[in-house]
Image (spheres, rainbow, N blue to C red):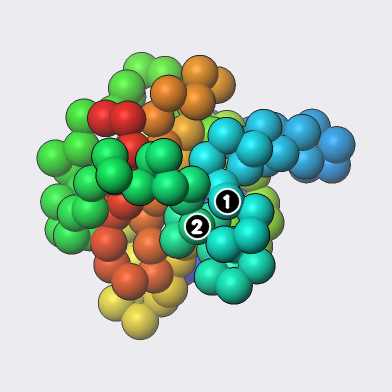
Amino acid sequence: MYIYDFFIKSTECKILQISGIERDEIINVFTDKFVDSNMVKERILYWNSFKDKYRGNIKRLNINQIKKLSLPSEKNIYIYLEREKKLFKGNIKHIHSFYEQQEPWEETDIIIFDESLNWVVAFTHEDEIVTYGL
């Protein structure tokens, strides 16, 4: 199941899609803080283009360690589907549910963060979790 379909069609998810100017503003604030604008031109994906000042504090985990992440489950977070350029607001349990249903051949790049921008987690198509601030 593709992640976009999962979030839009899943009955278990209470999730809101954010689009238009609001989406652009949120993503611009995120990229201004975390993404090296020169690096992303070459590397394409945000999670692979974090600014140097964050790179030293980034942790990398195997995707199988997803449930070991200590994320605020009671808090709404932003869920950005990087390849699809879709932004949602929901809960971390939706990410767990998605990965439990994902097929091995499906490639997904998801970035999650909250309004404070104190942390970011990227779930990559390379079956890796990239975290900062946790």
Residue 46 picture quarter: bottom right
How dense is the environment of label 1, judged by Cα within 10 Å: few (below 14), some, or many (20 and up)?
some
Q: What quarter of the picture does the N terminus occupy?
A: bottom left
Badge 2 element: loop
Residue at mark 2 to residue at mark 1: CA–CA distance: 6 Å
Left or right position of 96 against 89: left
> Which residue occupies the foreground of this view, 59 or 92?
59
On the question of residue 15 being in view, the answer is no
Q: Residue at x 50, y 57 (%)?
A: 49
Q: What quarter of the picture does the C terminus occupy?
A: top left
How dense is the environment of label 2, judged by Cα within 10 Å: few (below 14), some, or many (20 and up)?
many
Residue 49 image label: 2
On the question of residue 56 being in view, the answer is yes
- Provide residue 74's location: percent of width, then percent of height: 36, 18
Q: Residue at x 71, y 39 (%)?
A: 28
Left or right position of 98 against 80: left
Instruction: Indicate the amino acid at tag 1.
Output: Asp
Instruction: Say if mark 2 contacts mark 1, CB within 8 Å.
Output: yes
In this rendering, is residue 109 above or below 27? below
> Which residue occupies the foreground of this view, 31 or 53?
53
Residue at numbered disc 1: 36
Count of numbered marks: 2
- Provide residue 34's location: percent of width, then percent of height: 52, 40
Residue 52 image label: none
Q: Residue at x 29, y 54 (%)?
A: 129
Instruction: Indicate the amino acid at tag 2.
Output: Ser
- Provide residue 108's location: percent of width, then percent of height: 45, 66
In this rendering, is residue 107 above or below 88? below
Q: Residue at x 65, y 54 (%)?
A: 37
Badge 1 element: loop
Instruction: Say whether disc 2 or disc 1 marks the residue closer to the N-terminus.
Output: 1
